[in-house]
């Protein structure tokens, strides 16, 4: 049975209207990574971090999934018709555009914008528009909710399931990621030797040379073409 692992990054959501992080004009040119994407930044100024994530949540309500997200649903339907383990979509994205397109087997390794995490009991309740710093955790009642996202220096989520799927796959496809952030940037090396590796990106990423094949252009063009 053939098994495929797809890794997506911010580039797949760019044509839906969401900024990437490192492209010109991207998120890290608008705000300081150290301020909004580290536990230390959150400890220093939680209001600023909440404001940053609330703005991104607001932007998420204004956009819809695109043809690249939808092509991956077709691919999942083709692979997973006999075996639910045949297709795994690992996304670094915290948006929910894969789910809104209809993807089912999705792991958000950097968390989800639309969830909060309780620093007391680890519950991950849904974010609601009226949440404030004073909102109590619905599970334990403590006022210790933070965005359910993975900041620099924190352990990405679902790593056991991801590493197992990488070990077992025959094909690995990275889409719309600059391959600058680990551990995701190292996945291509982990599968080389037992899986065929493909990069789909606007332009070759920093580790394009590690892939067996690459196709370059906007995700809404190259992903449907790859799937068909
Ligand atoms: C298009 C397109 C179009 C544009 N069509 N394509 C030194 C060496 C090695 C590692 C480290 C090191 N120092 C520190 C580390 C570890 C650190 C790290 O990697 N740092 C590097 C910067 C060096 N990593 C961590 O701290 C991680 N944790 C960790 O390592 O734990 C220890 C561990 C040990 C062992 C095993 C496992 C773990 C945690 C990283 C957390 C990242 N968090 C963020 C924020 C999430 C929350 C939020 O949304 O705010 O995740 S940062 C940000 O970067 C976000 C993204 O998921 C991530 C990756 O970005 P992505 O998706 O690649 O976007 P861009 O903007 O970089 O690229 C966009 C791409 O799209 C480009 O290629 C464009 O060309 C393309 N594109 N338009 C197709 N239309």
Image (cartoon, helix red, strand yellow):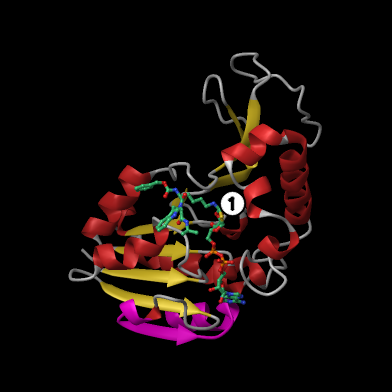
Q: Quadrant of the N terminus?
A: bottom left
Q: Quadrant of the C terminus?
A: bottom left
Question: Can you tell which quarter of the image residue 27 is in?
Answer: bottom right
* Residue at 33% over, 52% down: 84
Measured as percent of width and height from the top left, residue 155 is found at 43, 42
Measured as percent of width and height from the top left, residue 2 is found at 24, 66
Q: Which residues are magenta?
A: 209-228
Q: Residue furthest top?
A: 141
Asked whether, in this view, residue 134 is left or right of residue 149, the answer is: right
Question: Can you tell which quarter of the image residue 183 is in?
Answer: bottom left
Quick check: is the Cβ at mark 1 less than 8 Å away from ligand 1? yes
Q: Residue furthest left?
A: 193
User: Above or below — where is 59 with respect to 197?
Assistant: above
Q: Is residue 128 visible?
A: no
Q: Is residue 181 magenta?
A: no
Q: Is residue 118 visible?
A: yes
* Residue at 65% over, 41% down: 41
Question: Can you tell which quarter of the image residue 218 is in?
Answer: bottom right
Mark 1 — residue? 94
Measured as percent of width and height from the top left, residue 104 is found at 47, 52
User: Above or below — where is 122 with respect to 19?
Assistant: above
Q: How many marks?
A: 1
Asked whether, in this view, residue 199 is left or right of residue 95, the answer is: left
* Residue at 65% over, 19% down: 138
Q: Secondary structure at mark 1?
A: loop
Q: Is residue 216 magenta?
A: yes
């Amino acid at each position: 049975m053939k098994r495929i692992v797809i890794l997506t990054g911010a580039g797949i959501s760019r044509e839906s209207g969401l900024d990437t992080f490192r492209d010109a004009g991207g998120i890290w040119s608008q705000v300081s990574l150290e301020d909004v994407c580290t536990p230390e930044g959150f400890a220093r100024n939680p209001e600023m971090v909440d404001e940053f994530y609330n703005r991104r949540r607001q932007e998420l309500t204004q956009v819809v999934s695109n043809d690249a997200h939808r092509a991956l649903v077709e691919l999942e339907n083709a692979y997973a018709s006999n075996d639910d383990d045949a297709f795994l979509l690992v996304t670094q994205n915290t948006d929910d555009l894969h789910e809104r397109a209809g993807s089912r087997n999705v792991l958000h390794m950097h968390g989800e914008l639309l969830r909060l995490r309780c620093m007391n009991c680890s519950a991950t309740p849904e974010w609601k528009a009226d949440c404030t710093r004073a909102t109590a955790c619905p599970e334990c009642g403590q006022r210790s909710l933070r965005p359910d996202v993975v900041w620099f220096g924190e352990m990405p989520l679902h790593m056991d399931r991801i590493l197992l799927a990488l070990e077992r796959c025959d094909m690995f496809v990275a889409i719309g990621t600059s391959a600058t952030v680990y551990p995701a940037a190292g996945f291509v090396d982990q599968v080389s030797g037992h899986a065929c590796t493909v990069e789909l990106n606007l332009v070759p990423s920093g580790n394009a040379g590690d892939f067996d094949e690459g196709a370059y252009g906007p995700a809404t063009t190259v992903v449907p073409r790859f799937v068909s």
